[in-house]
């Protein structure tokens, strides 16, 4: 599926009436699994990218080229519309423009740009800090200027609800909406009242980070114009545990034949698209 078609599919989610949980993906295989299972979209988070690409915690030490390269590998593996967390845009507003250009070329369907002061400044030891509102607006405008395919969704993101409070959160959301972004992404909301307050203050489709049980109701969220709600990134953590437990068992002397948690040959053939490669081998190599 062409990049633009995927972006149109993602925009259909934003224009719809349902709240969708995207599948958290980290590489081509996980993206194919999410697509095969029927997820409407995939989510490639900055935290997962840092783990998958450089084996580091989420401290924004991953480079833009490393992030875009992994996004491209995910995108070329199938047809899943991919939402990515582009963090702070890898620099100032000019860096944001470049970031959008690179991620659009990598085939993403949508990307978020946030207003957190990243990477963590020297001497900052307390909770996260936000950049000034004017700088945040400048970043959103730069992101829009960097877009060449109008179907790519640019999403303004803020964690202000948990950092500076709801008044500042709404002021930022309204400013990013006025700048022209396509949707708004929030983290840190804890109550239904906060969700309703946000929905009443702006008109754009909403996205939420991992939601606490108090608001994790798809029907309620859909009624508040929330179109994307993350469920965390359990697939990657589960994969890490599976690899750890398997290697540990082998190291301790467990025979490979005794380990029963590996993917079946049928599943491996499906996620690697083995049938396609066999067909191409016959057609192109005479095999």
Image (spheres, rainbow, N blue to C red):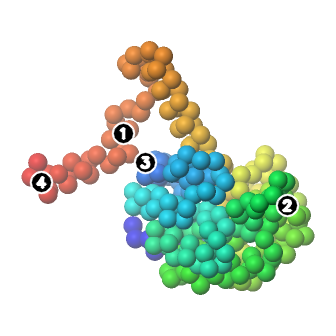
Q: Check whether the beta carbons of the residues at disc 4 and disc 3 lie within 8 A of each other.
A: no
- Which quadrant holds residue 178? bottom right
| Residue 153 image position (x, y, % from top left) | 59, 74
Q: Mark 2 against mark 3, which lies toward the viewer?
A: 2
Mark 4 and mark 3: Cα distance apart in space? 25 Å
The number of callouts visible is: 4
Q: Earlier in the sequence, mark 4 or mark 2?
A: 2
Q: Residue at x 46, y 68 (%)?
A: 106
Secondary element at tag 4: helix
Above or below: residue 46 compared with residue 201 = above
Secondary element at tag 2: helix
| Residue 125 image position (x, y, % from top left) | 82, 53
Residue in the foreground of this view, choosing between 128 and 109: 128
Q: Give the residue pinned by disc 1.
A: 268
Mark 2 and mark 1: Cα distance apart in space? 44 Å
Q: Earlier in the sequence, mark 1 or mark 4?
A: 1
Q: Check whether the beta carbons of the residues at disc 1 and disc 3 lie within 8 A of each other.
A: no
Q: Give the residue pinned by disc 4.
A: 285
Q: Give the residue pinned by disc 2.
A: 163
Q: Give the residue pinned by disc 3.
A: 29
């Amino acid at each position: 599926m062409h990049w633009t078609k995927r972006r149109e599919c993602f925009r259909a989610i934003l224009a719809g009436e349902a709240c969708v949980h995207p599948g958290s993906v980290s590489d081509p295989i996980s993206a194919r699994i999410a697509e095969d299972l029927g997820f409407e979209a995939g989510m490639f988070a900055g935290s997962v990218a840092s783990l998958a690409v450089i084996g580091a915690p989420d401290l924004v030490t991953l480079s833009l080229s490393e992030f875009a390269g992994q996004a491209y590998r995910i995108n070329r593996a199938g047809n899943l519309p991919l939402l990515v967390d582009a963090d702070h845009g890898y620099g100032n507003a000019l860096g944001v423009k470049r970031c959008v250009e690179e991620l659009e070329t990598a085939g993403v369907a949508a990307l978020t740009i946030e207003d957190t002061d990243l990477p963590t400044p020297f001497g900052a030891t307390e909770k996260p800090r936000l950049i000034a509102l004017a700088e945040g607006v400048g970043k959103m405008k730069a992101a829009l200027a960097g877009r060449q395919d109008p179907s790519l969704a640019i999403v303004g993101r803020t964690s202000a609800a948990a950092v500076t409070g709801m008044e500042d959160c709404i002021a930022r959301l309204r400013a990013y909406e006025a700048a022209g972004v396509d949707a708004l992404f929030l983290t840190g909301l804890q109550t239904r009242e906060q969700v309703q307050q946000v929905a009443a203050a702006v008109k754009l489709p909403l996205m939420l980070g991992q939601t606490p049980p108090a608001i994790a109701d798809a029907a309620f969220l859909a009624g508040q114009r929330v179109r994307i709600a993350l469920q965390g990134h359990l697939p990657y953590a589960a994969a890490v545990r599976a690899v750890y437990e398997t290697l540990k068992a082998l190291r301790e002397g467990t025979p490979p034949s005794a380990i029963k948690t590996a993917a079946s040959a049928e599943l491996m053939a499906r996620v690697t698209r083995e049938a396609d490669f066999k067909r191409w081998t016959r057609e192109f190599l005479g095999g």
